[in-house]
Image (cartoon, rainbow, N blue to C red):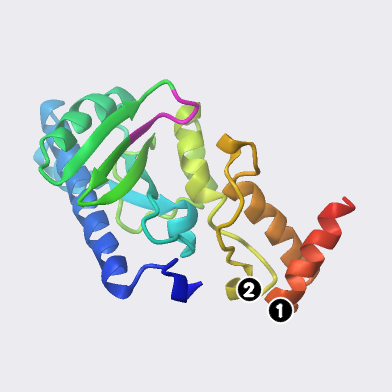
Amino acid sequence: LKPFGVFEDQEELIHRLVVLDKLNKLVKEWIVELGESKNLSPSDLEEVGGKIFTFGSYRLGVHTKGADIDAVCVAPEHVERSDFFKSFFVKLKHENQIKNLRAVEDAYVPVVKFEFDGIEIDLVFARLLMPTVSANLDLRVDSCLRNLDIRCIRSLNGKTHFTQPKLQTNYNVFVPERGIYSNVLGFLGGVSWAILVARTCQLYPNALASVLINKFFMIFSKW
């Protein structure tokens, strides 16, 4: 696929990292500013944190050239969902590098969509019931999900479950390529295909990719 320009070059990959770093800084600034407006003490403001986590094809390292980035903004307990769609939306609106900004609050998983310096980003929100969100926070720890709003749990599902494959197989063999998919168009979605591939990898943990393709269609044509 490389001769056909399917994948990004190193410069484009670095550009994505730069954009994500800028977005992460915006999130931290916003959380501190919001804390000030809600009268948090200076000592608390120094510790509140906040972080952007990626998931989906970008997190797995199988995104194609020009693909968007799925990410979740994880904030501490003083930040409400309404703040994300109001004050943070306004903050993004004032950034010169951000274009095509729009909010979809009534979606199954509410999201803010925008282009940041040419990179399309779908950003969802999750509020954790803890005073700080540290840089080394591990969202795979189940305690993070306790007593959360259902919309926050849905936002975190993409990060905590679907991009952390626990397979008894070679990860490089598992990672999928994009092809015929899209639940919007009536096909299986990317997550669905990934689960089917993961199951095949579990059944044949030492198989090469060429063998797994054959086994995949053999298994699911008879399932």
Going by the numbered disc 1, the residue's amino acid type is Leu
Residue 127 shows which numbered tag? Answer: none
Q: Is 180 within the magenta?
A: no
Picture coordinates of residue 140, whole percent (x, y): 51, 52
Picture coordinates of residue 21, whole percent (x, y): 23, 57
**In the drawing, does residue 169 fall left or right of residue 190?**
right
Write down the region rendered in magenta: 107-112
Residue 208 shows which numbered tag? Answer: 1
Q: Name the residue beneath numbered marker 2.
A: 173
Q: Is 111 within the magenta?
A: yes
Q: Is residue 44 visible?
A: no
**In the drawing, does residue 157 fall left or right of residue 200?**
left
At horizontal 18% and vertical 45% (from top left) the residue drawn is: 26
At horizontal 29% and vertical 44% (from top left) the residue drawn is: 132
**Neighbour tally class for label 1: few under 14, some 14-19, many 20 plus, Cα within 10 Å:** some
Picture coordinates of residue 67, whole percent (x, y): 40, 54
Secondary structure beneath dot 1 equals loop
Rounded to the nearest angstrom, the CA distance separating label 1 from label 2 is 7 Å
Q: Main secondary structure of the magenta part?
A: loop
Say whether marks 1 and 2 touch (CB < 8 Å): yes
Going by the numbered disc 2, the residue's amino acid type is Val
Q: Please tell me in which quadrant of the rendered image residue 76 appears.
A: top left
At horizontal 53% and vertical 55% (from top left) the residue drawn is: 163
Q: Please tell me in which quadrant of the rendered image residue 81 appears.
A: top left
Picture coordinates of residue 8, whole percent (x, y): 37, 68
Label whose residue precedes the other's in the sequence (1 or 2): 2
* Vertical arrangement, residue 160 with respect to residue 104, above or below: below
